[in-house]
Image (cartoon, rainbow, N blue to C red):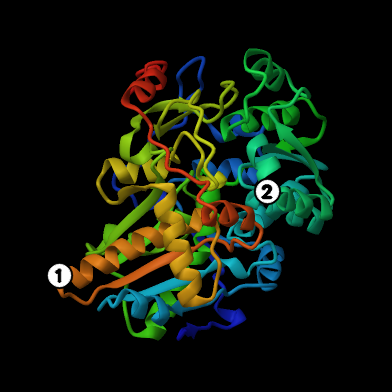
Amino acid sequence: MSTKKFLLQESDIPTAWYNIAADMKNKPRPILNPGTKEPLKPEDLYPLFAEELAKQELNQTDPWIEIPEEVRDLYKVWRPTPLVRAYGLEKALDTPAHIYFKNESVSPVGSHKLNSALPQAYYCKKQGVTNITTETGAGQWGAALSYAAKAFGLELAVYMVKISYHQKPYRRSIMQTFGAQVIASPSMSTKSGRKVLTENPTYQGSLGTAISEAIELAMGTPNCKYTLGSVLSHVMLHQTVIGLEAEKQMEMAGEYPEVIIGCFGGGSNFSGISFPFLRHKINEGKDIRVIAAEPASCPKLTRGEFQYDFGDEAGYTPLLPMYTLGHSFAPAHIHAGGLRYHGAGSIVSQLRQDKLIEAVDVQQLETFDAATLFAQSEGIIPAPESAHAIAVAIQEAKKAKEEGKQRTILFNLSGHGLIDMAAYDQYFAGDLSNYDLSDEELQKNLSTLEHII
């Protein structure tokens, strides 16, 4: 194994997040009130979110939002994160491509999710909120918010998708270690959860269901706010610390990425690595390709419809403009639990609509093939989610070899897989399989949408 790290100093941690919506020529369509179909104002979101987060969500004018000093101080616990030249992977592939990855797995909770968990907890605490709720798919977001809630003295309840609650018990343990209450979703503790279980007692859950439960609890609990780990624009904003650091590190390497890749569930780590580079494509016409790598079993960007839809299963959220598979979509039980979500964030959806980004779907077995090769060549066992980005990086490196061209590839290693070894055990035992979403099932879900666009 041969790698090279490009390291920054604490002083290089960004002092402001980058708001790509301010630079987009076609702004994301407005979030709508589901009853009136009128665009929401920040104050319409105040019952659900901390006020500052609601303002950030709808801000399409300010390209830079200052990072509070209290948040930046906590970022210093693990940021800046390394940028690594993956010589070992290049050698294994015998490719002329230069492959770099931003290693977000070095955070205290092992993933990029802490970049947004800390500011969300901070803004809630600053407003005097005492309790917060959230959902989590594979557990990375729940783990991150548990850490952040404890850092700011908040009580946290996490609805964890039931299949992951059982598949990934150690992520549940991490949340409980930091003092969070963890509930398997769907549960009997909410009206929306009881409805799902009444209709389908064996249902193993989805992020859409878990979001409904977390929102319901937040709205019914005094001095409580809801927080979200992906999809929404303020989450994408906070994650841009990843790409802003990577820009400086690519300069240190003397290269500029021609292809930028992130795995894709709702858009948080994908946006974090890509938005700072996309600003040069938008403002200067920089010739780069940006690729979202999503699971073939949950292919909203590759096979979904660009339409207004709810962000949750019960329909508690406002209507979001998104590439969606329909909010009632029940994803297959793949191990990349963080990518099992029916829709894409509104900013990413508009960028996809404007052909500023691409999307590729990847089968589960290919992602574990890629993860194993990466582990053997780079010494890091990646999370199943991150393995989607690795698989597409390998595809691009192989294309470079076929074409005989040197190509600079950058992907985001959004988290490690050390708590996902049960999934690797199943892979090595031959017990994992691919999942194909039929056109019939897809159209059944999409037919339920209101066609507003």
From the top left corner, tell me how far across and down residue 13 is, in percent.
Answer: 57, 74
**As drawn, 15 above or below 181:** below
Residue 24 percent across, percent down from the top left: 33, 49
Check disc 2 and report the residue beneath it.
168
Tag of residue 119: none
Q: Amino acid at mark 2?
A: Lys
**Quadrant hosting residue 202:** top right
The answer for how far apart the CA atoms under marks 2 and 1 are is 41 Å
Residue 231, relative to residue 79: is it above or below? above
Find residue 163 and report its horizontal and vertical position in percent. Answer: 64, 37
Question: Around disc 2, counting alpha carbons within 10 Å, would you say few (fewer than 14), some (14 to 19), or many (20 or more)?
Answer: many
Instruction: Using the image as rendered, state which of residue 234 and residue 391 is in the foreground.
Output: 391
Asked if the residues shown at circle 2 and circle 1 are in contact, with their CB atoms under 8 angstroms apart, the answer is no
- The residue type indicated by label 1 comes to Glu
**Residue at the farthest front position:** 429
Name the residue rendered at 35%, 40% in the picture: 301
Q: Going by the image, does 217 lie left or right of 411? A: right
Tell me the SS state at disc 1.
Answer: helix
Disc sitting over residue 403 in the figure: 1
The quarter of the image holding the C terminus is: top left
Query: What residue appears at the point 67 percent right and 50 percent down from the top-left corner?
Result: 120
Element marked by disc 2: loop
Residue found 39% across the figure and 37% down from its top: 300
Q: Is residue 304 above or below residue 356?
A: above
**For residue 321, which quarter of the picture?**
top left
Q: Nearer the viewer, residue 353 or 398?
A: 398
Is residue 423 visible in the rendered structure shown here? yes
Task: Give the crowd class for mark 1: few <14, some 14-19, many >=20 residues within 10 Å.
Answer: few
